[in-house]
């Protein structure tokens, strides 16, 4: 099939997925305020922009951020170019890293299989739900995935180099990419690639791998940063490094480890790569059945399996840790579709039929959900009693204040039914090209909707920015917080906030008439009972943002 694509067409197939990805990732950057997780990466950039150390990212003077500095440097550069730190400048590094990773995935698909496979793989990656989300938000994970993917592209080029000199030059670039991956998120940046490459090399009999260079160069890069940061960061930095290495492996209770069962990543990969993950079981099954001796197919397959199993062995898990797997899974799924497009068989196998049926059914369910408000008035406490209270609360807010008109809901229902029925027609016509087209079209439609108007509405109910603006107007120059403040509140307050962790800290704050105290809703009752001269000056009672500002009665009289 690839022979029909001449050189100009191949260039379009290489660049096309990246152009679509850049549009999809840039679309959401201005539609919402920073979330708590995003602000956690944004606050250190603010400090760096105002002259703090570039070597040790900080939340405040007492708290060191538990990640290396490369993402914060990228955010700082973007902020300097745009004239200041903002939601957009903090998200741009992820947008560019996400787009570049789509390009690298397309390129690796080209080199492993064909231009068609590469193009399909790039489009699959760009339209995977979790990938598109992380590529448009201020999170470290996307920059990390970029350097990991860059290293994998370089390693394949290195082992396929025509002469030893070229292979040695490429190995240096690969080693630098590994060092930058470590500087983005930590030791996994070298452990995962080396482990995957070692297993692959052993499996296919690949020799003459410059393992020493691939280890020494990245560790040298990281060592240079550690030496500088160690002298600047003091005891806080030294303690953080110990906890993030020895403590995390040992399961120390002093750091936040997200304990999950061993099977946690199975549903996570399905949710994260929706809708393409529906094809993943048949892709893996058919791949090992047909291509287990194919070194090209084994390269992404061994990498995907190695990281999946490796991460599953640790008790601390997060769905975003799987992000470096996405490019490898996209290449395998793209190759599966490429083979299906060129298969002259008049029948689909059960493995090909089942994912399409499931996807069509999923879209049909979404159409039904959209159409229900057209017919009846939904009461969450009655009709949605099976959901938890937080979800019912959010749905109730949306129904009361932001429910689209019945005409718009009916139009959205028709669009969903169009895609659902289109997939079934494609099956009837035995056209995998139409299956592919309807899947891509539906995914782009949902991403534009979810990351645009829906994200803007959700941000209005979850953002702490409005409350922070009210606090800035009401509070004097000095402000304290009971415990560690949420990073999004800290970001939007944009001022030093003293932390109170012990009773004596609270006493000192209460005795200072010029200082007001921020507390979470659950903390205010005992404080108000113990200090009757305090009153609630400002508060937000929303379930997502239960905060209060406490101060003496005299402050209430101020405008």
Image (cartoon, helix red, strand yellow):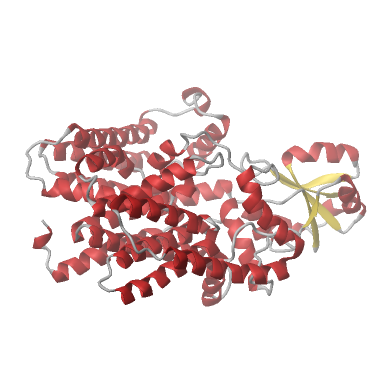
Q: Residue 327 vs residue 466: left or right? A: left
Q: Quadrant of the C terminus?
A: bottom right
- Residue 8 in view, yes or no: yes
When the figure is inspected, residue 56 is found, relative to residue 117, above or below; the finding is below
Q: Residue 506 or 198: which is nearer the viewer?
A: 198
Q: How many marks?
A: 0
In the picture, the quarter occupied by the N terminus is bottom left
In the image, residue 443 sits, relative to residue 238, either above or below, namely above
Residue found at the very far right of the displayed protein? 511
Tell me the residue at 69%/67% (across/down): 230
**Residue at the (52%, 44%) spot, across then down:** 318
- At x 73% / y 63%, what residue is drawn? 495
Residue at screen point 64% across, 44% down: 250
Q: On screen, 480 above or below 215? A: above
Question: Residue 547 appears at what percent x and percent y?
Answer: 71, 45
- Residue 125 image position (x, y, % from top left): 33, 53
Query: Is 159 displayed left or right of 512 in the figure?
Result: left
Q: Is residue 96 above or below residue 405?
A: below
Which quadrant of the structure image shows residue 489?
bottom right
| Coordinates of residue 71 in the picture (x, y in percent) | 54, 64
As drawn, is 134 to the left or to the right of 158? right
Can residue 29 be seen by looking at this rendering? no
Residue 130: image location, x then y, percent: 42, 48
Q: Is residue 489 left or right of residue 462?
A: right
């Amino acid at each position: 099939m690839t022979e029909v694509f001449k050189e100009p067409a191949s260039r379009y197939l290489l660049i096309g997925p990246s152009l679509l990805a850049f549009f999809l990732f840039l679309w959401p950057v201005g539609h919402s305020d920073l979330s708590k997780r995003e602000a956690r990466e944004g606050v250190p950039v603010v400090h760096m922009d105002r002259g703090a150390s570039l070597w040790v990212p900080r939340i405040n003077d007492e708290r060191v951020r538990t990640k290396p500095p490369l993402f914060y440097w990228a955010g700082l550069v973007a902020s300097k170019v745009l004239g200041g730190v903002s939601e957009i400048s903090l998200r741009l590094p992820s947008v560019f890293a996400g787009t570049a990773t789509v390009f690298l995935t397309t390129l690796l698909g080209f080199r492993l299989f064909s231009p068609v496979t590469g193009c399909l793989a790039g489009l699959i990656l760009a339209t995977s739900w979790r990938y598109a989300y992380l590529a448009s938000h201020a999170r470290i994970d996307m920059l990390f995935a970029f350097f990991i993917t860059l290293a994998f592209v370089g390693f394949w080029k290195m082992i396929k180099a025509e002469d030893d000199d070229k292979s040695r030059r490429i190995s240096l670039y690969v080693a630098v990419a590994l060092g930058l991956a470590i500087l983005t998120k930590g030791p996994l940046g070298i452990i995962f690639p080396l482990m995957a490459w070692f297993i692959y090399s052993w499996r296919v009999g690949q020799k003459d791998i410059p393992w020493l260079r691939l280890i020494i160069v990245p560790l040298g890069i990281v060592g240079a940063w550690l030496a500088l940061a160690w002298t600047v960061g003091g005891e806080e930095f030294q303690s953080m490094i110990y906890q993030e290495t020895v403590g995390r492996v040992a399961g120390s209770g002093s750091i936040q480890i997200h304990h999950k069962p061993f099977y946690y990543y199975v549903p996570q990969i399905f949710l994260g790569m929706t809708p393409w993950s529906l094809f993943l079981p048949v892709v893996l099954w058919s791949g090992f059945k047909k291509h287990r001796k194919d070194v090209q197919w084994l390269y992404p397959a061994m990498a995907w399996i190695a990281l999946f199993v490796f991460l599953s062995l640790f008790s601390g898990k997060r769905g975003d840790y799987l992000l470096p797997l996405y490019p490898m899974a996209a290449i395998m799924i793209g190759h599966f579709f490429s083979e299906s497009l060129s298969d002259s068989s008049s029948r689909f196998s059960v493995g090909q039929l089942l994912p399409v049926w499931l996807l069509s059914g999923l879209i049909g369910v979404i159409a039904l959900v959209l159409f229900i408000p057209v017919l009846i008035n939904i009461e969450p406490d009655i009709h949605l009693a099976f959901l938890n209270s937080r979800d019912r609360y959010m749905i109730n807010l949306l129904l009361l204040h932001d429910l689209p008109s019945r005409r718009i809901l009916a139009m959205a229902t028709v669009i969903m039914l169009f895609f659902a029925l289109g997939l079934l027609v494609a099956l009837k016509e035995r056209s995998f090209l139409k299956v592919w087209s309807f899947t891509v079209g539906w995914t782009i439609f949902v991403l534009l909707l979810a990351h645009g108007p829906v994200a803007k509405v959700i941000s209005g109910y979850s953002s702490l920015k409005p409350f922070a603006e009210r606090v800035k107007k009401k509070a004097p120059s000095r402000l304290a917080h009971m415990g560690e403040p949420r990073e999004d509140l800290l970001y939007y307050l944009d001022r030093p906030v003293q932390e109170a962790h012990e009773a004596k800290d609270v006493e000192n704050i209460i005795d200072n008439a010029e200082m007001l105290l921020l507390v979470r809703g659950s903390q205010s009752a005992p404080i108000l009972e113990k200090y009757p001269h305090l009153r609630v000056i400002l508060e937000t009672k929303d379930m997502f943002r239960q905060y209060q500002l406490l101060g003496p009665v005299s402050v209430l009289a101020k405008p």
